Image (tube, rainbow, N blue to C red):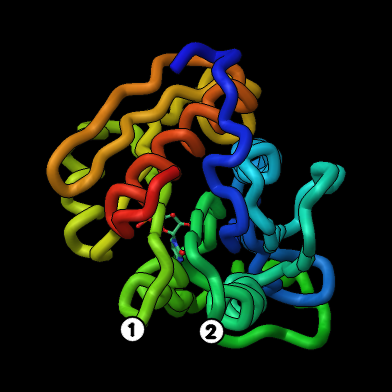
């Protein structure tokens, strides 16, 4: 499709859940572990899914972005565990789940309700525990929606992406190479789309244009799987 080709109606009547942005894992009342995700890609995907006629639920980590017009419901969360709760409730009746969020892999084992004091003699050691993998959990449900994951990689993009598609049992994976200029936090992105028996490269473009192409591919593959016409 060209960048101005219509995607209107391609997800008509379908319920789409999208998670977006980073998660923040609090250490104490003033400190947290976070990452550089801006949420721009996920919000652009939400906007494109609305344009395609979907009923969109957007679950957002801490981002400074306005809700795209037409999004049926936005739920703001902070931590990975809050995001998991919100996603699990929302995907119950969803047709498609798109996991664009940069969910923190770890959180601190023990949150300190008091600000941790700076000591002159020793630096604190943070014990970390793994967060739930929201995407893998949705993909393991039965029945489950059509599941699309994202993967930000710094090297061997295609190899890691394929491994992730299989390990997390996804219907589609959108992988991007992150460096200083592209990917996380930037306005542009480029994606390697892969599914079980194929794939496609979406070259560098503004996230809004890329999101429309991604939604077009998701719609095509969703309808191919369900056998319903687009
Ligand atoms: O394994 P990795 O973190 O690279 O996988 C990225 C994909 O998995 C993204 O779609 C992200 O939203 C999702 N994910 C998740 N829960 C986690 C970690 C990643 O849903 N705890």
Q: Residue at x 48, y 69 (%)?
A: 106
- Residue 154: image quadrant is top left
Depth check, mark 2 against mark 1: the one in front is 1
- Residue 57: image quadrant is bottom right
Measured along the vertical axis of the image, is residue 28 above or below residue 6?
Answer: below
Q: Position of residue 114 (x, y in %)?
A: 82, 84
Q: Quadrant of the N terminus?
A: top left
Q: Residue at x 74, y 69 (%)?
A: 77
Q: Position of residue 164 (x, y in %)?
A: 24, 54
The alpha-carbon separation of the residues under discs 2 and 1 comes to: 31 Å
106 lies left or right of 120: left
Can you see residue 64?
no
As rendered, which of 3 and 203 lies closer to the eye?
3
Q: Position of residue 2 (x, y in %)?
A: 49, 12
Q: Quadrant of ligand 1?
A: bottom left
174 lies left or right of 166: right
Q: Position of residue 175 (x, y in %)?
A: 36, 38
- Say what secondary structure mark 1 lies in: loop
214 lies left or right of 206: left
As rendered, which of 70 and 168 lies closer to the eye?
70
Task: Assess disc 1: are there few (<14), some (14-19) or many (≥20) residues with their C-alpha within 10 Å of its C-alpha.
Answer: few
Q: Residue at x 64, y 69 (%)?
A: 25
- Residue position marked by numbered label 1 in the rendering: 142
Q: Residue at x 60, y 67 (%)?
A: 123
Q: Which residue is at the far front?
A: 229
- Label whose residue precedes the other's in the sequence (2 or 1): 2
């Amino acid at each position: 499709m060209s960048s101005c080709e219509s995607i209107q109606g391609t997800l008509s009547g379908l319920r789409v859940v999208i998670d977006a942005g980073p998660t923040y894992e609090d250490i104490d009342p003033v400190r947290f572990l976070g990452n550089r995700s801006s949420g721009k890609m996920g919000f652009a995907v939400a906007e494109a899914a609305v344009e395609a006629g979907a009923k969109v639920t957007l679950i957002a980590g801490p981002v400074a972005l306005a809700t795209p017009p037409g999004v049926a419901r936005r739920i703001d969360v902070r931590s990975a565990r809050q995001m998991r709760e919100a996603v699990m409730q929302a995907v119950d009746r969803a047709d498609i789940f798109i996991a664009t969020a940069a969910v923190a892999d770890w959180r601190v084992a023990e949150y300190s309700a008091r600000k941790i004091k700076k000591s002159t003699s020793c630096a604190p050691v943070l014990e970390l525990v793994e967060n739930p993998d929201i995407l893998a959990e949705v993909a393991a449900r039965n029945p489950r929606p059509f599941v699309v994951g994202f993967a930000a990689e710094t090297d061997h993009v295609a190899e890691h992406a394929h491994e992730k598609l299989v390990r997390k049992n996804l219907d589609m994976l959108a992988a991007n190479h992150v460096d200083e200029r592209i990917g996380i936090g930037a306005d542009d992105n480029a994606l390697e789309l892969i599914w079980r028996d194929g794939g496609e490269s979406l070259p560098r473009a503004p996230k809004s244009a890329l999101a429309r192409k991604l939604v077009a591919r998701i719609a095509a593959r969703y309808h191919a799987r369900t056998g319903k016409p687009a």
